[in-house]
Amino acid sequence: MGDFIFSDLVVQLGYAYASTNKGMLNFFFTAPAADAAACRLSPQIAPTGALFTHFYVDDPADTINEWFVRTLQATDVAEMSIEAHYDRQPERVYLFGISNGGHVVRRMLSEFPRRFDGGVDWEGVYWSPAGPNILVDLPLALRNWEPYVASGFSRRSPAFQAMLDAGYPPDIFASPPTPGNTFSPVVGSHWETHANNYWDVTTCVFIRELDPLYVMNQLDPRGGSDTQDYDYLARRTPFHLSPRIGRISTDGDIFRPLLTLQGTMDALLPIKRHGRPFRDAVVAAGRAGLHRYYEIQNGNHIERYRQSCCNFTQLEFIQAHAHRAFQLLVDWVERGMAPPRSQCVPRGGTIVADPGSAGRPEQCAELLVD
């Protein structure tokens, strides 16, 4: 769950390493007229708003619950391979996951603690039946996206303020916009890049998976049943959605050491709606002693938006902090060295041993700093 980002580090440290994309393929492009599970890639106002995808998670045999099963199966295969090659079982088994993979790590350490010794959760998805969750947050972003564009990307617009009120980080602009700025080559808005790559299609994929009775029409903008029209809280009780979300939720009741990292400028999974609520859940479950939570100021959900594709130079990379977190986890589990307390890692900074002396709160006061 993070092969190219993580394998080089752990292999050099001498670990055997197995990676999986949650045990399934990702997606293919499709035609909506011929595919009942088709999801539009981007909002209709985008240049890519006529492209449709089919994600395998929406197939009957590839549900979110299968992610957990297949992670266990991948662990079984890795352990059998080690035993066959070295004639002994591994001494330790660690997990590392990003985004949906971070969600899987959380669930594994809650439900199968005998199988794993600890984990690193980088920007894991938070699911709660009452919210926050993706089905509450992303339709709201989509409802405000087009009015924000129509305002000329005005920070004084009601749509901009509504996004901030909903927990999203402020919009920023690439310097300069480039053709490589994925699906957002002209304006170079951070929100635009997320809307065109993630907000619309992610909403559709999870609606189809978790609320299959919602009749979604993405071809008729006036039909009132598109992704932006979806109202999870209104549908939660009459359509019995709480049990569905409950089966994949993360309640914070972990039984093995877990280090969580998330960037404050994450515009797909806003930290106020994902990282912080999960931390609160861990504390409420009485498991704070097994958890460390590091907020990376100006960090984003997608590393390459900082430089290689998009020129959002205001953003910070998270990978180095994630690598450090793994080494802190190993020291914690194998040497009894407790990692630094939870903290805001300021832009340009690193995780420090004594955040109290450094004047670092657990949560960053500002999501974006210059």
Image (spheres, grey):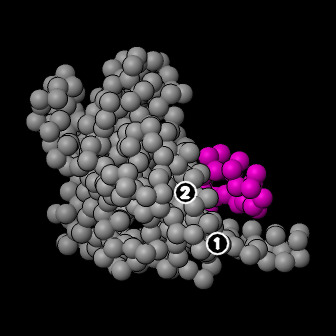
Of tags 2 and 1, which is closer to the observer? 1
What residue sits right under mark 1 in the picture?
335
Q: Amino acid at mark 2?
A: Ala
Of label 2 and label 1, which has the lower sequence position?
2
Residue sticking out furthest to the bottom = 114
What range is drawn magenta here?
Answer: 1-24
Tell me the quarter of the picture where residue 125 sits. Answer: bottom left
Which residue: 75% across, 61% down? 15
> Spatial distance from mark 2 to mark 1, Cα to Cα?
15 Å
Does residue 210 appear left or right of residue 53 in this picture? left
Q: Which residue is mark 2?
A: 325
Q: Nearer the viewer, residue 32 or 290?
A: 290
Q: Residue furthest front?
A: 357
Q: Is residue 287 above or below residue 292?
A: below
> Are the residues at dot 2 and dot 1 in contact (C-beta closer than 8 Å)?
no
Q: Is residue 271 above or below residue 132?
A: above
Residue at 17 percent across and 29 percent down: it is 155
